[in-house]
Image (cartoon, rainbow, N blue to C red):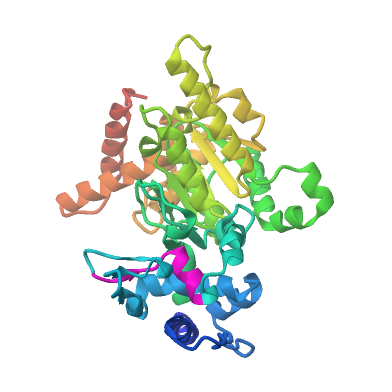
Amino acid sequence: MENTNALKNNSITIQNELNWLSDLIDNRLDFFFSSEEDKQFVSLSSPDLDKDTSNMAAFIKRDLSDDFERLLIIGAIAANLFPEVYDRFLIKNKTLDKPYTEFGGRKNSDSNYFEPTLRTIVFIMYGSSIVHKIKLLNYFNFDHIFKQSKILSLSQSTEPLELLDKTLKLGEEFMLHITSGTPFKPSFTSNFPASRLDTPLDWGDLVLEDNSLDEINMIDTWLQNQNHFHENPVLSKKINKGYKALFYGPPGTGKTLSASLIGKKNNLDVYRIDISQVVSKYIGETEKNLGNIFDIAENKNWILFFDEAESLFSKRTTVSDSKDKFANQETAYLLQRVENYNGLILLATNLKPNIDLAFSRRIQSVVNFPIPSIKQREILWKNALKDLVEIEEKDLKEIAKSYEIAGGSIKNIIQYAWLKAMYKDSQITLNEILMGIRRELNKDGKSFEK
């Protein structure tokens, strides 16, 4: 219901802004084609938002400083969702038998819609004013909110275009916010090769050594208090922005689960980066892929989880050829982006010695995930079998004592035992569990014999 109300309120605000844009176009064209020499252009006031509580209105009142910024936003929205607003610019100059160059824009050959450019928006608001055309750069520099918050950008083209001849592109996240009010949760794409981690488990299901739990609690404490670091001018000078942690240990020992639980407890999205889609053999592509990830994640307070991090954060090598040189450049670029990220970055690896020392110096927490002890394995087995099957205590103790198996492998064993029982149309017994243990140990080339 809340999202429905937000959508309704935002729709009303957007419609009012569209009406303002439409009236501005009519007003400008009437003035442009007027034959009266002494006719004065009368500007139109933007809609009053004093009593408007929509996301769109809140954004305008909080973040925009003038009506031209406001016109740029609604102009881009119209180009994407309501292109018919610009149909009036399709008129031709009959004398020259071509479109009016003063209007800017272009006709899309596929849709026949008029595509407004920055020149079009300037014309609507200011006509042929040279001063305002010069001031345009201020709206698209790095310090402006359009750039900082990825709200509005100018189109990139293979053809060299003047600033005024570029089209406007709305940020996907911003568009979601001002229409439905829902948070931006990107899907896996080539630009953002990451998937959101989630887990039905809770902290009670995480079985770790006390030292490891203490380090994870430090991460959790930072997340709960990170605003203090950002808002305190003294702390901001003395403490690094963001937080970086390294999880290391054998597979199945809880690294991914810990990342998921940290996000779940703090109500933050955790994105696991698919490193296979990031690393490229082509020069410059790895940096480009990493840049896309950090650009999208910037200022979102997402947790970035780099699994199998050793393939990306590996030690730099002595330069012996051009390949080594570019590999070291990738590492240097990654160091910079990791350093500047103001959220939480989690690196997970099975091979801690392979991590570059330069990354180690930037890491605030190093968490060891060893193979569970006998006591921990017993707890893991009890948790895994709870509400599923009753196994005698002495048998569980014997299994925990005899087989060094991590939590991830125990999960595989329980799944196998359940499937085996279903196949036999029976209940899980100790025999199916032992068969699963043998199967899991064989996968790792280990002996089942005690």
Q: Nearer the viewer, residue 273 or 443?
A: 273
**Residue at 50% across, 25% down:** 314
Q: How far from the left and from the top, in percent, is residue 234?
A: 84, 49
Residue 345's image quarter? top right
Q: Where is residue 128 in the image (x, y as percent from the top left)?
A: 52, 70
Residue extending furthest toward the left: 424
Which residue is more in the foreground, 317 or 165?
165
- Residue extending farthest to the top is 320
Quarter of the figure that contains the N terminus: bottom left
Question: Residue placed at 44% from the left, 63% from the top?
Answer: 168
Q: Quadrant of the C terminus?
A: top left
Residue at image point 47% right, 23% down: 327
On screen, 156 above or below 311? below
Q: Is residue 207 above or below residue 228?
A: above
Viewer can see residue 300? no
Lateral position of residue 424 relative to residue 148, left or right: left
Residue 325 on the magenta span: no
Q: Give the range drawn in magenta.
A: 112-124
